[in-house]
Amino acid sequence: MDARYDIVVVGAGMAGASIAARIGTKARVLMVEAEEHPGYHTTGRSAAFWSESYGGPGVQPLTTASGPTLRELGLLTPRTALTLGREGQQGEVAAFAETYSAIGLEVELLDRAGIERKVPGLREGWICGAFEPSCCDIDVGGLHQHYLAEGRAAGVDLWCRAGLREMERTDKGWTLTLSDGRQIEAGVLVNAAGAWADPVASMAGLAPLGITPYRRTVVQLAVSPAAPDTLPLVLDVSGSFYFKPESGRLWLSPHDETPSPPCDAAPEEIDVALAIDRFEHVADWQIDRLEHRWAGLRSFAPDRLPVYGFAPQDPAFFWFAGQGGFGIQTAPAAADLGARLLLGEPAGTVDPNPYSPSRFA
């Protein structure tokens, strides 16, 4: 046996790095990562923003609770957000605003004149919007590096190029065989494997939860006029696109969700074309060139809420997965909630019950 750890965290993206950092001073912890460096997949491809409405009311408590930490770390930059509606969608936009105003978020309904002031060159047909002044950009790389550094300082070990090959349940927890042939013993395994969360559970002999990876495409466009820094994050109430400025360029997504096997995701030409077509129906800016395109996988449980907690079938297997497209903006609160459950600490400010894996039992 090459090593023994109290807790082995599978995956070193934002999920794995954040919970490992939180528990590192209280247990002997190892992160194992299949890739050559941590954050290669979803974390390294995120165009993340911190929006308290993004992900729905079930995710909002995690996002709101994460705000103070993200601000203290200096990783939020004010952006604002604007959710647009066409003729006939006034009721949907009003319902959106009412839903989030009712839980304490600041949301302002705007008419055509109001949304024109926010988005220059807005095409006809867009007549209303819901404006959220609290939305911010997140320094994703900075947050991930913060957790990796915090983990190192706490004594967390990180092994890259160390995917799981076999798992065997023992009286003391697990014997894990890695892709490089090393064997380790673990008291508890934390499944923070993102798109690979269900395959990891199957390897452990547990029933998968139906956590499905979906491909999301983003393109970077050079546009004329240059995208103003004051532009909000712009979405539509139907969920068919979002875009935001990035150093004079535009980051644009068709908000696609295409089921995918766990893989190194790549953008499809049809999704790139769809993104550009949808943008051209929103603003009359000239697209000078397509500069970059990429895709990542966002993994959702069947009810689209994250899964945090011990597997009902096995007290040595802990789920920390299914964060969808909101794993970055919820990372501080999710790591705190997960660590409290994992270590048996008193509950924090976020109710863990909606995220328990027992809801699928």
Image: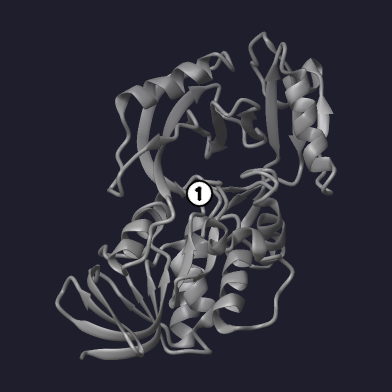
Tell me the quarter of the picture where residue 84 sits: top right
Q: Residue beneath label 1, please? A: 324
- For the point 36% across and 90% down, the residue is 172
- For the point 57% across and 29% down, the residue is 227
Q: Could you say which is closer to the camera, residue 194 or residue 244?
A: 194
Q: Could you say which is closer to the camera, residue 332 or residue 300?
A: 300
Q: Could you say which is closer to the camera, residue 110 or residue 340?
A: 340
Tell me the quarter of the picture where residue 331 sits: bottom right
**Amino acid under disc 1:** Gly
Q: Could you say which is closer to the camera, residue 68 or residue 255?
A: 255
Label 1 crowding class (10 Å Cα cut-off): few <14, some 14-19, many 20+?
many
Q: Position of residue 83 (x, y in %)?
A: 68, 30
- For the point 83% across and 33% down, the residue is 108
Q: Position of residue 80 (x, y in %)?
A: 70, 40
- Using residue 245 as the reference point, say whether residue 264 is left or right of it: left
Tell me the quarter of the picture where residue 283 sits: top right
Image height of 170 relative to 81, above or below: below
Q: Position of residue 262 (x, y in %)?
A: 31, 49
Q: Look at the image and tell me whether residue 272 can be seen.
A: yes
* SS for callout 1: loop
In which quadrant is the N terminus drawn?
Answer: bottom left
Q: Look at the image and tell me whether residue 129 can be seen.
A: no
Image height of 326 relative to 92, above or below: below
- Using residue 31 as the reference point, say whether residue 145 is left or right of it: right
Image height of 299 relative to 280, above or below: below
